[in-house]
Amino acid sequence: MPQTSIIHNGQEYRFQDTESAQAFIDQIPSPKGDLKIEGGTELFQLLNEVGAPMLNWKEINTEICNEWNQTFIGDQSESNWPLLSVKRVDLLALFKSVMDIAESAIDPEDLEVLRDAREGQYKTFILQEAMVGENVCVETLYAVTEREIRAGRMDPSHTLRKIATDGIAAPHMTRAELLAQIQPQKPTFIQKLKKFF
């Protein structure tokens, strides 16, 4: 993670992570005066722009999507799943907050279009998280929708929750079975031996 520098009223402060930098920014009384951010993530910088997220919610939303997609690149193993889940939960909470503000910032005539787009994007996030290979894992979808309901981001009557509840009650492949399908098969002793001849 890149180091973050905050220059406030001519004084430079350095932070090893964006959480510490954000805590510093949050304690500065308003108006914040001359504040410049160097380093940190694009999302961190966008969230700390003047007027954010009211004035730049579209850019923030784009960066949330970029960071979301990054959680699907690299190590997708079961051992890395909890860490990825925490990052995704943070992004979903931020998405909800930013879109709540966006709904209050747009013209009322555009509100229904925004709400439809927001719902479609949210469903995409949830379904992406429930994927194992090219399949939606019913067990994962059930767990993710349960988490979302508990967090207050999803209504218990949401269509994805109904799909998860119906799916878990019916015969289905387990997450372990789906993972086994996409794991490369280890060569047998005979197959290894044939490589030498």
Image (cartoon, rainbow, N blue to C red):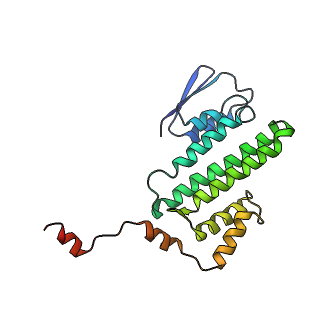
Outermost residue, top direction?
Answer: 10
Q: Quadrant of residue 45?
A: top right
Q: Taking 187 as reference, is 169 left or right?
A: right
Residue that appears at 57% across and 48% down = 68
Q: Position of residue 59 (x, y in %)?
A: 65, 35
Q: Position of residue 161 (x, y in %)?
A: 71, 66
Above-or-below relation of 194 to 57: below
Residue that appears at 77% across and 44% down = 114
Q: Taking 11 as reference, is 111 left or right?
A: right
Q: Quadrant of residue 105?
A: top right
Image quadrant in which the C terminus is located? bottom left
Above-or-below relation of 119 to 11: below
Residue in the foreground of this view, choosing between 40 and 183: 183
Residue that appears at 72% across and 43% down = 98
Outermost residue, left direction?
Answer: 197
Q: Position of residue 40 (x, y in %)?
A: 54, 35
Counting the numbered discs, the total is 0
Residue that appears at 64% across and 54% down = 124
Q: Taking 191 as reference, is 172 left or right?
A: right
